[in-house]
Image: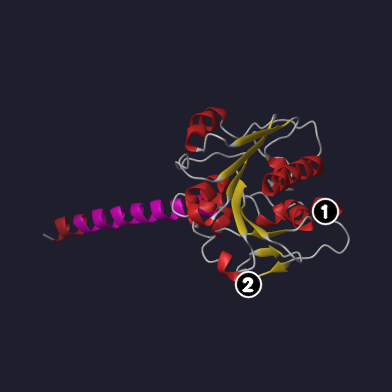
Amino acid sequence: MSFFADKRKRKIFIAAAASLLAVLTLFFACAVYLGDYYRADNNAIGAFLPQGASWKEEPNGTIVFEPEGAEKGFIFYPGGKVEHTAYIPLMQYCAQRGILCVLLEMPFNLAVFDVNAADGISGEYPYIEEWYIGGHSLGGSMAASYLADNADKYAGLILLGSYSTADLSDTELDVLSIYGSEDGVMNREKYEANKANLPKDFRQVVIDGGCHAYFGMYGAQDGDGTPTISNAEQIRFTAESILEMMKE
């Protein structure tokens, strides 16, 4: 009896050890994946920003650019696995021209973990008359998903190297879609297929010589194309396109 009992115990022990090893391996793999992200290029950001540039950083990581007299607001979801501070130059450029910008930090740098991050923000700034939401890459897709249940609270959606998998075609949203001609990361087939999810009058802008990574300042991105314009040029062009949309 003891022989068979010991044999059963050994089997249970081996099974438990194997399960624990599998869990630890999965945990380690997740930790490595989530810890490997694109960090903001602080040197490039510092060179781009004008002297005296300032913003407010909240305890939860949200960065707010609040120009005096702003009437329009822009909530931004950062790209997947990109440090949110990489988008400070784009937000600062828009803020300099009178747009209140709210740059969100996402859990593990992935907007998919907090699609509803925009909840409650508009209530903190009651003087803003029109709100826009958008983001880069995965962030743009998640911002679009958020609008599926909140379209009536926003004037428009801004997609940077991104597309909407949520059906927004029947909404009254103004939609601006921007991507670079050299973008090697965005899936073009999915982009084309998901155009049907946007209102028919959405505006598409292709930045000649632009790439996927240059909407922020975080260096080169794996799989991206080779840009023929500078990072600063792409950010300025993007910001001007956004501002033009908001003024109409």
> What residue is rendered at 78% in x and 55% in y?
97
Residue 130's image quarter? bottom right
Q: Main secondary structure of the magenta part?
A: helix
Residue 192 at what x, y percent from top left? 53, 29
Q: Nearer the viewer, mark 2 or mark 1?
A: 2
Q: Residue furthest left?
A: 1
In front of the other: 238 or 32: 238
In front of the other: 119 or 59: 119
Q: Which residues are magenta?
A: 8-31
Which residue in the protein does label 1 denote? 43
Q: Amino acid at mark 1?
A: Asn
Q: Measured along the vertical axis of the image, is residue 10 above or below residue 162? A: below
Residue 17: say if magenta.
Answer: yes
Residue 133 at what x, y percent from top left? 59, 52
129 to the left or right of 9: right
Which residue in the protein does label 2 denote? 59
Q: Secondary structure at mark 1?
A: helix
Residue 186 at what x, y percent from top left? 59, 34
Label 2 Cα neighbours within 10 Å, binned few <14 / some 14-19 / many ≥20? few
In front of the other: 15 or 34: 34
Q: How many marks?
A: 2
